[in-house]
Image (cartoon, rainbow, N blue to C red):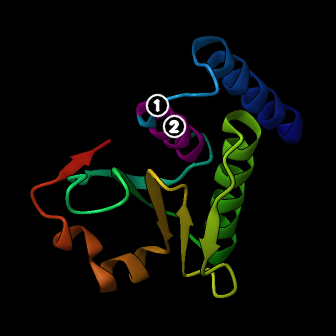
């Protein structure tokens, strides 16, 4: 029964986003969709960072935490599959082998998914101080 509910949530989310965006969607739509997928799958401490386009090739960074290696991998896979299916964007992925910290590169949006203790150790939010938005 739980699997059916999760499938329905995914289908409802995809229908909602398909009805409101076209496939030439903006970074804002992509970012909103990724945050929704992370939230639905119980990611915690989701943080958005806006990056100056003069400084970098990407516009936004999302940072989230999963409670275990298994959840970190599951979150990364859900985001990757959802974005590929809805936006037709393939991503580069790093860190899946260790699953302490997985990076998903969607060009305009970079997603970091950490185990909490690894996130605390690296504290990448501090590098982007002044650009943070808690979600």
Q: Image quadrant for the N terminus?
A: top right
* Residue 5 falls left or right of residue 78: right
Question: Tag on residue 26?
Answer: 1
Q: Splitting the image into 4 quarters, where does residue 55 fall? A: bottom left
Q: Residue at x 40, y 81 (%)?
A: 117
Between the C-alphas of marks 2 and 1, the distance is 7 Å
* Residue 91 falls left or right of residue 52: right
Q: Residue at x 42, y 73 (%)?
A: 116
* Residue 48 falls left or right of residue 130: right
- Looking at the image, is 131 positioned above or below residue 116? above
User: Could you say where residue 3 lies in the image, as x and y percent from the top left?
Assistant: 86, 41
Instruction: Give the labeled residue for mark 2.
Output: 30
Tell me the magenta residue range.
28-39
Q: Splitting the image into 4 quarters, where does residue 68 fall? A: bottom right
* Residue 76 falls left or right of residue 48: right
Q: Residue at x 64, y 59 (%)?
A: 91
User: Could you say where residue 2 lies in the image, as x and y percent from the top left?
Assistant: 83, 39
Q: Image quadrant for the C terminus?
A: top left
């Amino acid at each position: 029964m739980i699997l059916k509910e999760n499938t329905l949530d995914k289908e409802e989310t995809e229908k909602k986003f398909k009805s409101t965006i076209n496939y030439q969607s903006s970074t804002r739509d992509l970012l909103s969709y990724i945050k929704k997928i992370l939230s639905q799958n119980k990611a915690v401490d989701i943080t958005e960072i806006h990056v100056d386009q003069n400084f970098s090739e990407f516009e936004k960074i999302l940072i989230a935490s999963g409670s275990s290696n298994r959840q970190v991998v599951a979150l990364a896979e859900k985001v990757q599959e959802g974005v590929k299916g809805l936006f037709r964007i393939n991503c580069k992925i790093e860190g899946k082998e260790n699953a302490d910290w997985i990076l998903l590169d969607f060009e305009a949006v970079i997603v970091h998914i950490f185990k909490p203790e690894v996130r605390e150790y690296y504290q990448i939010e501090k590098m982007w101080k002044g650009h943070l938005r808690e979600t």
